[in-house]
Amino acid sequence: MNLAALARFGRRFADTALGLIYPPVCQICGNERAAADAGFVCRTCHAQIRFIEPPFCNRCGLPFAGEISGAFECSNCRELELHFDHARAAVTLDGPVQTALHRFKYNRAEWFESFLARLLIERAAPELANENWDFIAPVPLHPVKLREREFNQADRLARRLAKATGIRHESGLLRRVKPTETQTRLSRAERAANLRGAFAAAGDGLEKARVVLVDDVLTTGATANAAAAALREAGAARVVVWTVARGTLRPVLACESAPNI
């Protein structure tokens, strides 16, 4: 048996084993059939996913409702010192994506990994192919949090994206050196203060490097910005951020934040 046939057999065996543990039904709604290679997400739930389309902020990727032509920055970005060149997300954080990400991250529902990674790769890979990048790096967890959670969801997604793009995956570019409280209930200013000094670049090799930073969700951008700052301080020439989802409650109306056009 050649390697390709062996790999196909391995995938079939893994799917069969998963089917014995998890019923071949959608793990979001529980109503329709969904295969392992689809991340156990059915077509109906998949149809509820909202991919982020223009117009959106040229820096942080915040989606806008309305007709806007040309590149622009939202008012939030104009008020902040951003250390990444731009941030992009594949989809909005709601519906099936929000459920899958929460369960993947906090309940070790690892069967959702392929589903979430596919969303990221679908949008990120074509964009990353337009430039030369040195590294794909995950936003790291603090060692204490990593021991509690047992895996870093950002690293899992970064590995998948690296494999799809051929860009070198490097999980050791950054270290999380300060334990931080959960960001969920903090304001934008509190998040920034909470993350100040939280990251440090690990080792050398970042001089003039071009880095793709990967995380699961971007909300205010405080985590990504703090991580990007550490990479910049170590000499990185470019840092862009890609996440599966954009954690915004709703698209911002154009009239709520007049763009620079």
Image: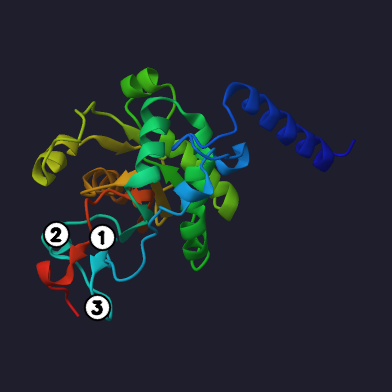
- Residue 14: x, y in percent? 68, 29
Q: Reply above or below: 83 against 95.
A: below
Mark closest to the chain's N terminus, 2 or 1: 1
- Residue 62: x, y in percent? 25, 60
Report the Cα–Cα distance between label 2 and label 1: 10 Å
Q: Residue at x 24, y 44 (%)?
A: 226
In this rendering, which labeled residue sits more in front, label 2 or label 3?
Answer: 3
Quarter of the view holding residue 179: top left
- Residue 158: x, y in percent? 48, 43
Q: Secondary structure at mark 3?
A: loop
Q: Is residue 20 left or right of residue 100?
A: right
* Quarter that holds the C terminus: bottom left
Q: Residue at x 19, y 37 (%)?
A: 195
Q: Residue at x 32, y 48 (%)?
A: 93
Please tell me the numbered disc located at residue 76: 2
Crowding near pointer 3: few (<14 within 10 Å), some, many (20+)?
A: some
Q: Is residue 257 left or right of residue 140?
A: left
Amino acid found under the numbered disc labelled 1: Leu
Q: Nearer the viewer, residue 259 or 167?
A: 259
